[in-house]
Image (cartoon, grey):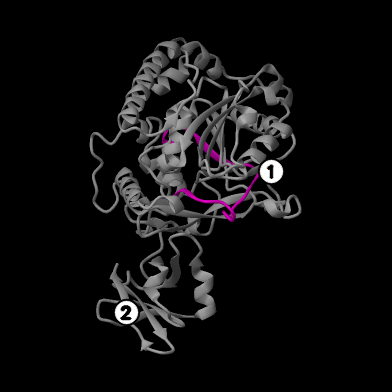
C-alpha cells in the first residue's frame, strides 16, 4: 500500500486518511490504558495530523540549495530526556545555532523529579514551538517507551530529527541537514536517513574537548542476548558526501517527517536492541542509511553527573530481559517464531525484506555472524559472495573470533584481590584465560546504583566454548567459589 501511496500522489490523501485514523485510534486506546493504570503522565494536546499536512510534507522538492529552508520547511525534533542537567543547554544551543529557529517544533518527553530544582522547562512552556509531555520519573518505562510517546505528537512536519538530551550544534545545522538530505534525493535516493554516532563533547570543558572529526558506526559484535553492538570510528578524511551506512543511531537521525509514522519506536523495547531493530525496519521501509561526512552535532557519552532511568528502576532487569526477547523474536533468532500479534507498526516494512538487509549489510541474524567484509568495516553494500565459496563470505569456524561479555553484580566477587576469567570446552579443556588484578578489576566496575562488573573477551577458537568461569581469589582466603555458566 505504501509504495503505491508514494508513487501515486493522487492516492496519497486516501491512504493517509486510513493510516491517520488507525494511528489516532491506537493513540486513544494507549492513553485510555494509561489512565486506567494511573501513570502520572500529563500531555499537552498535540495537533492532529491531517491528510493535507502530510500531502504537503510529501511533495518532492526541487533541486536543493541552502535557501530552500527559507520556504518554511519545518523540522520535528524528538528529545527523550531523563533527569538530565544538559536538557536546557541542549535546547538553547539547538535554537541559537539554527539558521531558522522559527521552523523548529520540539516534542520533548520530559521525565523529571521534583527533587531536581534545576530541571525546569518554564522558559519554553508557553512557546508554541514546544510540545512537552510532563512525566514523573517514577512512571518512566525506558527510552523506547518515552520516544514512542513523543512521536505521537508528530503533526505533519517536513522533516524529523531525533536526538538525546545532551548535544551541541554547529551553526546552521538545520540548513546543512536539509541540504544534505535533498542532495541525496536528487542523486536518486528516494528516502534518505542520515544517522551516526555523533562525535563527543564534554560539558565540563566545552568547547575545548569537542572531537573535531566526524564519526561513523562499525560492527562490533552480537551480544549473548542477540542484539548487535556497534562502535564509533573516524570517518575517512577523503569523504566529500554522506557515506552509505548499515546502522542507525538513536541519538542522531534525520529523515523526512513520515519516518516518524513509518518506523516508530517500539514501546515494548527497553534499551538494547533499539538501534539494530530500527536500522533494519527503516531499510525494509525503503530508507537508504547514510553517515554524514561532516560534523552536524556533538554528543555527550560519559553519563557522568546525571541519573539514568535504570538507576531509579529496581525492575529494569526484567524490562531489559523482555526487550531482548522481543528483539530476538523480531529477527526470529534461536528458533523463535514471530507471532501474528507482534504488532504491525513495529515490524518490518513492505519495500524490502530482512534477507535483502542481510545481503546489504553482510549480517546473518539467525547465525549471529557477520561477513568478513563487514568485519573489515567495508562500505556497504557488501559485495556478492563468490558462488563457489560455501561460506558465503562469512568466516569459517576456524577463522571466527568468539566474542562474549560476562556481566556480574559487583558483590558476587566479594573482597577479591584477583580473578581469572576462563572459557572451557565440553571436556573441561581451557580455551582462553585472562587474569585481572585489583586495579584492573576497579577499572571494570561500572559505578552505578547496580554496580555491575563486565568482562569482555574476544579470542579465536575452533568452535563455541561450552562454558565460562570467573574464579575470584582473596589474599586471606585463597581461591574462592567459582562463578560459572554454560553458554
Q: Position of residue 42 (x, y in %)?
A: 45, 28
Name the quadrant containing residue 226. Answer: bottom left
Q: Name the magenta segment's main secondary structure.
A: loop
Q: Please report the bounds of the magenta region as a residue range.
A: 282-309
Residue 482's mark? Answer: 2
As displayed, is residue 197 above or below residue 80? below
Q: Is residue 399 visible?
A: no
The correct choice, above or below, for 433 with respect to 100 in the image is below
Dot 2, crowdedness within 10 Å: few (<14), some or many (≥20)?
A: some
Residue 373's spot in the image, x, y percent?
Answer: 49, 56
Residue drawn at x 34%, y 30% is 34
Against 371, residue 415 (above or below) is: below
Q: Confirm whether residue 93 shows in the render.
A: yes
Closer to us: 336 or 376 = 336
Give the mark nearer the N terminus: 1 vs 2: 1
**What residue did someone put label 1 on?**
294
Secondary structure found at label 1? loop
The image quarter containing residue 26 is top left
- Residue plotted at (51% across, 63% down): 447
- Give the number of the mark in front: 1 or 2: 2
The verdict on residue 170 being magenta is: no
Q: Nearer the viewer, residue 22 or 228?
A: 22
- Residue 401, horizontal then vertical, whole percent: 42, 68
Placement of the C terminus among the 4 image quadrants: bottom left
Amino acid at each position: 500500500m505504501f509504495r503505491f501511496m508514494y508513487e501515486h500522489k493522487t492516492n496519497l490523501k486516501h491512504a493517509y486518511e486510513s493510516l491517520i485514523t488507525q494511528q489516532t485510534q491506537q493513540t486513544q486506546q494507549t492513553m485510555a490504558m494509561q489512565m486506567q493504570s494511573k501513570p502520572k503522565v500529563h500531555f499537552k494536546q498535540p495537533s492532529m495530523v491531517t491528510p493535507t499536512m502530510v500531502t504537503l510534507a510529501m511533495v518532492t522538492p526541487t533541486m536543493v540549495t541552502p535557501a530552500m529552508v527559507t520556504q518554511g520547511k519545518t523540522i520535528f525534533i524528538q528529545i527523550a530526556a531523563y533527569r538530565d542537567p544538559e536538557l536546557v543547554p541542549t535546547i538553547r544551543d539547538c535554537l541559537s545555532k539554527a539558521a531558522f529557529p522559527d521552523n523548529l517544533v520540539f516534542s520533548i518527553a520530559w521525565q523529571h523529579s521534583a527533587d531536581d530544582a534545576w530541571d525546569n522547562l518554564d522558559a519554553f512552556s508557553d512557546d508554541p514551538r514546544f510540545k512537552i509531555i510532563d512525566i514523573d520519573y517514577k512512571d518512566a518505562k525506558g527510552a523506547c517507551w518515552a520516544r514512542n510517546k513523543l512521536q505521537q505528537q508528530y503533526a505533519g512536519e517536513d522533516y524529523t530529527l531525533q536526538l538525546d538530551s545532551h548535544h551541541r550544534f554547529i551553526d546552521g545545522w538545520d540548513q546543512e541537514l536539509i541540504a544534505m538530505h535533498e542532495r541525496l534525493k536528487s542523486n536518486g535516493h528516494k528516502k534518505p536517513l542520515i544517522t551516526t554516532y555523533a562525535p563527543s563533547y564534554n560539558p565540563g570543558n566545552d568547547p575545548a574537548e569537542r572531537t573535531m572529526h566526524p564519526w561513523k558506526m562499525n560492527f562490533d559484535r552480537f551480544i549473548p542476548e542477540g542484539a548487535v553492538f556497534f562502535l564509533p570510528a573516524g570517518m575517512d578524511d577523503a569523504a566529500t558526501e554522506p557515506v552509505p551506512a548499515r546502522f542507525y543511531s538513536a541519538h542522531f537521525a534525520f529523515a523526512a517527517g513520515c519516518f516518524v509514522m513509518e518506523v516508530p519506536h517500539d514501546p515494548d523495547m527497553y534499551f538494547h536492541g533499539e538501534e539494530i531493530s530500527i536500522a533494519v525496519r527503516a531499510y525494509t521501509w525503503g530508507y537508504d542509511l547514510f553517515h554524514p561526512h561532516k560534523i552536524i552535532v556533538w554528543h555527550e557519552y560519559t553519563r557522568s553527573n546525571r541519573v539514568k532511568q535504570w538507576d531509579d528502576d529496581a525492575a529494569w532487569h526484567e524490562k531489559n530481559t523482555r526487550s531482548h526477547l522481543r528483539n530476538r523474536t523480531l529477527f526470529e533468532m534461536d528458533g523463535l517464531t514471530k507471532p501474528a500479534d507482534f504488532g504491525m507498526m513495529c515490524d518490518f516494512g513492505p519495500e524490502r525484506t530482512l534477507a535483502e538487509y542481510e545481503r546489504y549489510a553482510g549480517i546473518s541474524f539467525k547465525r549471529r555472524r557477520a561477513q568478513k567484509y563487514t568485519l573489515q568495516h567495508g562500505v556497504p553494500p557488501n559485495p556478492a559472495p563468490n558462488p563457489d565459496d560455501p561460506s558465503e563470505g562469512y568466516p569459517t569456524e576456524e577463522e571466527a573470533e568468539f566474542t562474549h561479555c560476562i556481566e556480574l553484580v559487583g558483590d558476587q566477587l566479594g573482597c577479591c584481590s584477583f580473578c581469572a576469567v576462563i572459557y572451557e570446552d565440553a571436556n573441561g579443556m581451557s580455551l582462553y584465560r585472562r587474569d585481572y588484578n585489583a586495579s584492573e578489576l576497579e577499572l571494570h566496575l561500572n559505578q552505578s546504583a547496580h554496580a555491575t562488573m563486565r568482562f569482555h573477551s574476544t579470542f579465536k577458537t575452533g568452535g563455541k566454548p561450552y562454558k565460562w568461569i570467573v574464579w575470584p581469589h582473596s589474599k586471606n582466603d585463597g581461591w574462592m567459589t567459582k562463578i560459572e555458566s554454560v553458554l
